[in-house]
């Protein structure tokens, strides 16, 4: 029996976390693709993944494309086990530490001529295993186990694999966090091309893991006013944008006054211009907290150009505003795409989630390719393809990479004394 199940979209959501456990957990229920995604790693593609007779079955896509299917959760240290049955010729593999932009590791399951079982590959061979097929039962189910441990104190990664209970290969390599990820999704592959017939397949079943999903751990810890990165967050590549004491790593555009580091916060007062990161970002996840006074008007700029143009339109702006008082005080009517959380000029928030004046709010923003998702205080406001939304100029003409910025917008009047405070700013490049 063949069941085709729609794949889930990748999303960053606290509600998707599952209880942390070191017990053996099933990753595949044999009936659905719940817990699996096809985007979010280093080798996204368009392979065909279906459920057939209780197995996770992979084939080439309709035009011979390959691609991976990933665990929705990310892992660092674990033992991953599965049973695999593969037709020939088929090129497959088990992938570790899969995140956008960085390299991970592949345990090869390559049946074409000169292909290897249990070799370690990452955009090139790291370790060959020419004798790996010796104890493989062709055309039958074989059990593969992959043990991964990132020995951070020693700066190395250890991989050990077993085939039907016997050691298949062992590999240790120095870690290079600028090149290799130290955690990520686990992926299963269909490699496209290589003369495979369209119906040639690889099948997986009894897929389990013993290890803790990193997104079930707190990404940030410590007192609310001064969060720190957890070990899990560091493994996933998060870094601080603000040290709580200075504006190192930032630069002022426009009036040089009006933004200071104060009491563990960045205090933004009226004026013009913006406080911008010295570094540019393309694909990223962003976490920050903000607090507003009455009649505050600010925003968070994403991928803004450094050519002196308006960053709300060279990149884009996620609005920060006093939604409660603005219309009354100014005797004006806001557009829906001007309220807090909106993608300014383009997308209105689908829910009202701003806390009362004086309380702290949290943004979680994910910008990957043309996909932008914004969450305010745990409520998803939108998840959109920016090429499909309105706005001038259209998003395909905006900067593909640029600075992150905090807007210093002028007040509603010359007497305005409004302000915005930002704290706990963290970013994860993707």
Image (tube, rainbow, N blue to C red):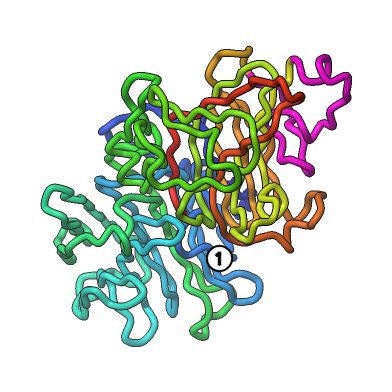
Estimate the x, y position of residue 351 in percent, counting from the top left: 72, 25
Q: Which residues are magenta?
A: 325-354
Estimate the x, y position of residue 146 in percent, counting from the top left: 25, 55
Point 84% across, 28% down: residue: 334
* Vertical side of 168 occupied by 38: above or below: above
Estimate the x, y position of residue 302 in percent, counting from the top left: 60, 48
* Vertical side of 95 occupied by 360: above or below: above
Rate crowding at label 1 as few (under 14), some (14 to 19) or many (20 or more) other CA atoms within 10 Å: many
Residue extending furthest left? 154
Side (left or right) of 406 relative to 129: right
Q: Is residue 48 magenta?
A: no
Residue 363: quadrant of the picture: top right
* Vertical side of 393 occupied by 229: above or below: above
Q: Main secondary structure of the magenta part?
A: loop
Q: Of helix, strand and loop, which one carries label 1?
A: loop
Q: Is residue 350 magenta?
A: yes
The foreground one among 412 and 179 is 412
The residue that mark 1 highlights is 45
Point 38% across, 53% down: residue: 186
Point 24% across, 74% down: residue: 126
Side (left or right) of 318 relative to 331: left
Side (left or right) of 421 relative to 25: right
């Amino acid at each position: 029996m063949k069941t085709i199940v729609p794949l889930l979209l990748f999303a960053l959501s606290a509600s998707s976390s599952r209880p942390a456990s070191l017990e053996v957990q099933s990753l595949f229920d044999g009936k659905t693709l719940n817990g699996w995604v096809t985007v979010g790693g280093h080798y996204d593609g368009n392979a065909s993944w279906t459920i057939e007779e209780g197995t996770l079955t992979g084939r080439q896509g309709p035009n011979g494309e390959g691609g991976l299917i990933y665990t929705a959760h990310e892992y660092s240290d674990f033992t991953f086990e599965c049973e695999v049955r593969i037709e020939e010729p088929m090129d497959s593999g088990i992938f570790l530490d899969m995140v956008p932009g960085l390299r991970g590791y592949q345990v090869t399951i390559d049946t074409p001529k000169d292909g290897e079982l249990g070799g370690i590959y990452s955009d090139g061979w790291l370790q060959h295993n020419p004798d790996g097929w010796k104890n493989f039962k062709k055309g039958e189910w074989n059990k593969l186990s992959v043990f991964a441990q990132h020995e951070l104190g020693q700066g190395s990664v250890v991989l050990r694999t077993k085939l039907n209970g016997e050691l298949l290969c062992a590999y240790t390599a120095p870690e290079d966090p600028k090149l290799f990820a130290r955690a990520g999704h686990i992926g299963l592959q269909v490699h496209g091309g290589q003369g495979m017939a369209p119906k040639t397949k690889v099948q997986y079943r009894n897929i389990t893991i013993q290890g803790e999903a990193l997104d079930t751990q707190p990404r940030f810890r410590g007192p609310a006013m001064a969060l720190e990165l957890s070990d899990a967050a560091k493994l996933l590549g998060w870094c601080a944008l603000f040290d709580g004491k200075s504006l190192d790593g930032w630069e002022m555009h426009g009036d040089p006054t009006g933004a200071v580091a104060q009491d563990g916060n960045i205090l933004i007062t009226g004026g013009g211009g913006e406080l911008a990161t010295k570094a540019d970002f393309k694909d990223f996840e962003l976490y920050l907290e903000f607090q507003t006074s009455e009649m505050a008007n600010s925003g968070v700029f994403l991928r803004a150009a450094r050519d002196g143009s308006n960053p709300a339109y060279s990149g884009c702006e996620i609005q920060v505003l006093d939604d409660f008082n603005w219309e009354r005080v100014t005797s004006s009517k806001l557009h829906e795409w001007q309220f807090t959380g909106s993608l300014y000029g383009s997308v209105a928030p689908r829910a009202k989630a701003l806390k009362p004046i004086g309380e702290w709010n949290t943004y979680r923003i994910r910008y990957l390719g043309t996909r932008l998702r914004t969450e305010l205080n745990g409520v998803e406001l939108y998840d959109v393809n920016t090429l499909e939304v309105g706005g001038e100029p259209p998003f395909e003409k905006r900067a593909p990479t640029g600075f992150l910025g905090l807007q210093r917008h002028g007040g509603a009047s010359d007497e305005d004394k409004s302000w915005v405070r930002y704290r706990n700013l963290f970013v994860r490049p993707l």
